[in-house]
């Protein structure tokens, strides 16, 4: 399983969830697989997807918020794990697709390829619900069955990205349609 | 009311409903009030840039966030201010204690203190500087400006603001 396959499985389960998606190829892959107004593609601010998702989760407590993040980006903002685990919103799933590499910059290894274990880091940060997935076919059922809570879901994949085009939307369009997707009703 | 109470009341009364903070000794009084009174949602963050991310997400979800930090943390936030707040036009209020100015005794504060105004200028963030209790209404002005123009603003709280009380 590569990240593209993982995002494909995640995209198939989505219903009303608000999604904050990581910078670079993950956002392009999600756009390609299943674009929807409830997707916020983070085009800049490397490392901050999980933080944006936390802010959204506390301000929209009745919505489910999913963050699609990566190993490189979460390693850049490890403090975010402790903030999220301490705020502990009841409506947040932080999905970290760990392909042990910086996939958007040419597949250079991250430290998870060697000694670093994000599952243990999440536990140390204070997450009470941690799930590790290594088989693609389990993704849908696990995500579907996660109840209320603040969940850390680690999906281990191989490196490598799909060949997908850039997202043609302007950042302002992404923001406006995202906000309208849950404020109009 | 002392300075901290006055600042706190303005923050509370002018529509801010979420505070992200990294502590500074100058901000201790305001942070204590925020924590004691529990009228504002408050999330202490581990690094200023993280606060910018949370603030941006909260704005998307309908909140009016302010970030309460020392000016040194502005340096930690530049990429997020430009490639998140500016890129998506997300207005956030930055309330910063300004170390490294006149009378600063800690050498380490001076380099960042010197370039703080220039950094805010570069990022296009309009900034208000508050040096004394007489100027405290500038905080209102800045918050209202941010709301009316839908843009991020900076408020620099100078050390002299507190030293006049001592
Ligand atoms: Mg990666």
Image: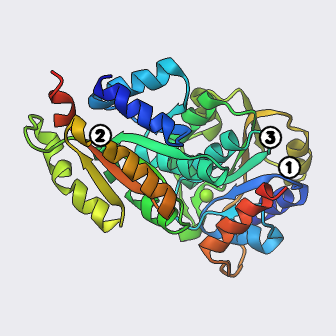
Dividing the picture into quarters, in which one does residue A12 lie? Answer: bottom right
Q: Residue at x 50, y 60 (%)?
A: B148
**Residues marked 1 and 3, same chain:** yes
- Residue at image mark 2: B136
Q: What is the quadrant of the N terminus of chain A in the image?
A: bottom right
CB under 8 Å between callouts 2 and 3?
no
- In front here: A111 or A143? A143
Color encoding of the figure: rainbow
Distance (Cα) linking label 2 and label 1:
54 Å
Left or right: A46, with B57 as reference point: left
Residue A124 spot, x, y in % from top left: 58, 27
Q: Judge depth for marks 2 and 1 and give the one in front.
A: 2
Distance (Cα) linking label 1 and label 3:
23 Å
- Residue at image mark 3: A62
Residue B53 spot, x, y in % from top left: 53, 50
The secondary element bearing badge 3 is classed as: loop
Can you name the residue that lies furthest to the top here? B36
Asked whether mark 3 and ligand 1 are closer than 8 Å, the reply comes as no
- In front here: B50 or A76? B50
> Would residue B140 be seen by someone viewing this image from the given angle?
yes
Distance (Cα) linking label 2 and label 3:
37 Å
**For the residue carrying disc 1, how many other residues have a C-alpha within 10 Å: few (<14), some (14-19), or many (20+)?**
many
Q: Earlier in the sequence, mark 1 or mark 3?
A: 3
Asked whether mark 2 and ligand 1 are closer than 8 Å, the reply comes as no
- Residue at image mark 1: A139
């Amino acid at each position: 399983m590569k990240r593209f396959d993982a995002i494909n499985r995640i995209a198939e389960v989505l219903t009303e969830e608000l999604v904050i998606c990581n910078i670079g190829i993950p956002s392009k892959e999600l756009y390609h697989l299943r674009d929807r107004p409830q997707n916020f593609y983070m085009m800049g601010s490397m490392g901050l997807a999980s933080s944006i998702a936390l802010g959204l989760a506390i301000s929209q407590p009745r919505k489910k918020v999913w963050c699609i993040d990566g190993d490189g980006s979460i390693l850049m903002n490890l403090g975010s794990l402790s903030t999220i685990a301490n705020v502990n919103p009841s409506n947040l799933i932080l999905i970290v697709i760990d392909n042990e590499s910086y996939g958007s910059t040419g597949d250079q290894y991250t430290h998870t390829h060697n000694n670093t274990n994000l599952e243990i880091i999440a536990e140390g940060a204070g997450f009470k619900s941690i799930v590790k997935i290594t088989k693609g076919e389990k993704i849908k059922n696990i995500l579907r069955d996660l109840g209320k809570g603040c969940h850390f879901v680690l999906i281990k994949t191989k490196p490598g990205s799909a060949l997908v085009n850039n997202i043609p939307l302007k950042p302002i369009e992404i923001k406006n349609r995202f906000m309208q997707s849950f404020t109009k009703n | 009311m002392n300075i901290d109470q006055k600042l706190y009341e303005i923050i509370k009364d002018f529509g801010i409903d979420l505070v992200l903070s990294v502590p500074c000794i100058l901000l201790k009084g305001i942070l204590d009030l925020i924590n004691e009174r529990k009228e504002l949602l408050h999330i202490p963050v581990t690094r200023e840039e993280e606060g910018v991310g949370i603030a941006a997400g909260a704005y998307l979800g309908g909140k009016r966030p302010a970030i309460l930090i020392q000016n040194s943390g502005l340096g930690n936030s530049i990429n997020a201010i430009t490639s998140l707040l500016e890129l998506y036009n997300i207005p956030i209020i930055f309330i910063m204690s300004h170390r490294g100015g006149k009378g600063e005794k800690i050498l380490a504060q001076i380099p960042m203190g010197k370039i703080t105004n220039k950094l805010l200028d570069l990022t296009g963030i309009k900034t208000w500087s508050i040096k004394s209790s007489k100027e405290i209404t500038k905080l209102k002005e800045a918050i209202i400006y941010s709301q009316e123009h839908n843009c991020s603003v900076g408020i620099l709280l100078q050390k002299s603001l507190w030293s006049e009380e001592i």
